[in-house]
Image (cartoon, rainbow, N blue to C red):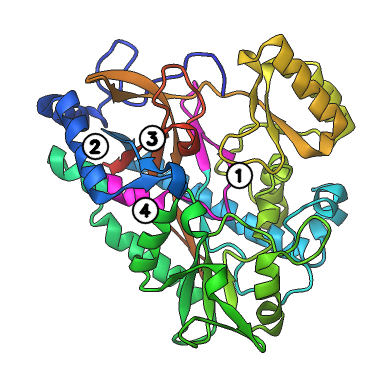
Amino acid sequence: MSTGAGLDEALLPDGGDREHAAPALAAVRAYGPGALAADVARAAADLGLLHGPADEAHVFTVDPVPRVLPRAEWEQLAAGLHQRLRALEAFVADAHGPREAVRAGVVPAVVLDTNRYLAPGLPPPRRWIGMAGPDVVRGADGRLVVLEDNVRTPTLLAYALAARDLVAPRLGVQPGPAPVREAARSAMRRMLAAATDVADPVVAVLGDGPRSSVAWEIDRLGEMVDAPVVLPSQLAARGDALVLPDGRRVDLLWRRTSEERLTDDDGRPNELGELLLGPLRAGTVTVVNAFGTGVADDKRTFPYVEDLVRFFLGEQPQLRSQPAYDLGDPARCRAALGRLHELVVKPRSGSGGHGVLIGPRADAGQLERARAAVLAAPGEWIAQEPVALSTHPTVVDGALVPRHVDYRPYAFCVDGETIVLPGGFTRVSLTEGELVVNASQGGGGKDTWVVG
């Protein structure tokens, strides 16, 4: 993130259309951007496409101008994701086992010793990471880089599928491989089946109910994998088993909750721990993504991911990380504090864009408060080099205007294979100049096509 001008995903510097984006832009203009946006908004409301907890839910904004990625670029991205997830999978297993990465000096011991997401004392799962949805951005140099890895409970997949249903049929342009909904359904089911040794598992989807910002999505995912969506309060631990209200034993639990730990900071079991620790220790239930996966998603791990690729795979990273610094390292911290006004500062366990300081846009008071917070607990922060986020034509008040975007591809890990759905989701800020694109802070989304 930065205040600098980024390139436009669909338009050339002279205002002409980029070749890969031209058919989609022509279709939007022919329909009429304002009319198209109004039609899509009405359809989203009719669909009940809500985002936010029940007491403040609103219709999610689907911008009707699709983002288009050339197939060759997307294939490179998919290969890079496969490599990156192999390394992160190995790291999570290592963090819960021999800790070779620590012994080799690849990751400081304190990064694991202070990690909130470790889940020691449980039988290792067949796979730690089942689904991933990293945040990927394009900088001014045109290169796609990873901003965050998101291997705990990545969201917005169902919104991406809804955007495809709402936008593509109205434009009459082939959006790439179809039907993407069936590809997603197949990938999800294969991912779940690969997570357990049970031949015909009883599957349940664990949600947060009305307090969840993505309750609409969780219900749709349950429908797609033909599994009931349940709350922790609707499940019971009976002996060593986890059972549904109808008495069936749950073999596989797809966790879609905002709670990603089994214990509180004091080490005592939380609500999920009280429910799940017994069955997990007994090996009678499998959870996807597994508790403990957050070790790889902790922002303090992020600065070391490229080195983890080299260490575990013996390969050079194909998909790069946006440079970031562990402020728990005294030398890194001193250097970052000297240029706080140039960096993006993130809380270690933050999400949704909350608590992020964009140094180039911060005033003196904000910078001083950030400095004090870092000095008070340096290990709870990372700093990241800013990115001149790319923009994309977006409909605002009936006109096509540039708005900042990022990209969330969705990957499913299945027995050594990584299934990356063609397309994914583009998140877009709806406010001029705003760099935070998170839906929880007013952002919307775009259908994303892969063509060529």
Residue under numbered circle 3: 444
Q: Nearer the viewer, mark 3 or mark 2?
A: 2
Q: Nearer the viewer, mark 4 or mark 1?
A: 4
Q: Residue furthest front?
A: 55
Looking at the rendered structure, the kind of residue marked 3 is Gly
> Magenta part of the protein: which range?
135-163
Local crowd size for mark 1, using a 10 Å CA cut-off: few (<14), some (14–19), many (≥20): some
Residue under numbered circle 2: 41
Residue under numbered circle 1: 317
Marks 1 and 2, how far apart in space?
Answer: 40 Å
Q: Is residue 100 above or below residue 274?
A: above
Marks 4 and 1, how far apart in space?
Answer: 30 Å
Secondary element type, mark 3: strand
Local crowd size for mark 2, using a 10 Å CA cut-off: few (<14), some (14–19), many (≥20): many
Q: Position of residue 2 (x, y in %)?
A: 57, 19
The quadrant holding residue 312 is: bottom right
The quadrant holding residue 367 is: top right
Task: Specify which label sits upstream in the sequence, 3 or 1.
Answer: 1
